[in-house]
Amino acid sequence: MKNFTKELTYKTSRSSGAGGQNVNKVETSVTVMWNVADTQFFTDEEIALITAKLKNRINLEGILQFTVSESRTQLQNKKIATDKILETVNKSLFKHKPRKATKPSKRQVEKRIAAKKQISEKKENRRFKL
């Protein structure tokens, strides 16, 4: 898990929603931004992986950003936004192991065919015969 918080920039704005008069006066909403292309923290391969996996979240300037206004305080929103961006980037770096295709064993195949034959015989015996 990598921590690249030194490269993050923050911007505050007025939040919407609950908070009463506080909402109208204080800038509690926090937008955290990170320039993926200009990072010194990751290798070129890791940058390519992050860009590929988060292409829908990265804007045209190559900036990944999250806006958080969950809490009523700017400090808490800043912490939540930082955690969110760190978690997202670290998840994007995880490489899944490729699935290996397997065949059912001979015993499993025989068992399935035997069960099908048994059901077939049961249905055949239900038929009316002259």
Image (spheres, grey):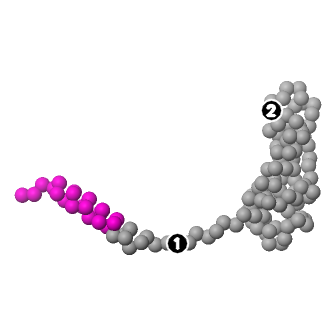
**Which is nearer the eye, 69 or 80?**
80
Q: Which residue is drawn at 81% across and 50% down?
A: 83
Q: Does the magenta stretch include residue 127?
A: yes
Badge 1: residue crowd in 10 Å (few <14, some 14–19, many ≥20): few
**Which is nearer the eye, 80 or 26?**
80
Find residue 85 and report its horizontal and vertical position in percent.
81, 53
Badge 2: residue crowd in 10 Å (few <14, some 14–19, many ≥20): few
Say whether marks 2 and 1 touch (CB < 8 Å). Answer: no
Residue type (three-letter) at the residue carrying disc 1: Ala
Q: Is residue 60 visible?
A: no
Q: Is residue 66 left or right of residue 27?
A: left
Find residue 28 and report its horizontal and vertical position in percent.
89, 37
Range covered by the magenta-colored residues: 111-130
- Residue 15 occupies which quadrant of the picture? top right
- Look at mark 1 in the image and give the residue it sits on: 101
The residue tagged with tag 2: helix, strand or loop?
A: loop
Q: Residue at x 81, y 67 (%)?
A: 47
Above or below for 82 versus 101: above
The total number of labels drawn is 2
Residue furthest to the left: 130
Residue type (three-letter) at the residue carrying disc 2: Gly
Q: Which residue is drawn at 79% across and 50% down?
A: 84
Quadrant for the N terminus in the image: bottom right
Q: Can residue 2 be seen in this view?
A: yes
Residue furthest to the top: 21
Badge number at residue 115: none
Q: Nearer the viewer, mark 2 or mark 1?
A: 1
- Look at mark 2 in the image and give the residue it sits on: 17
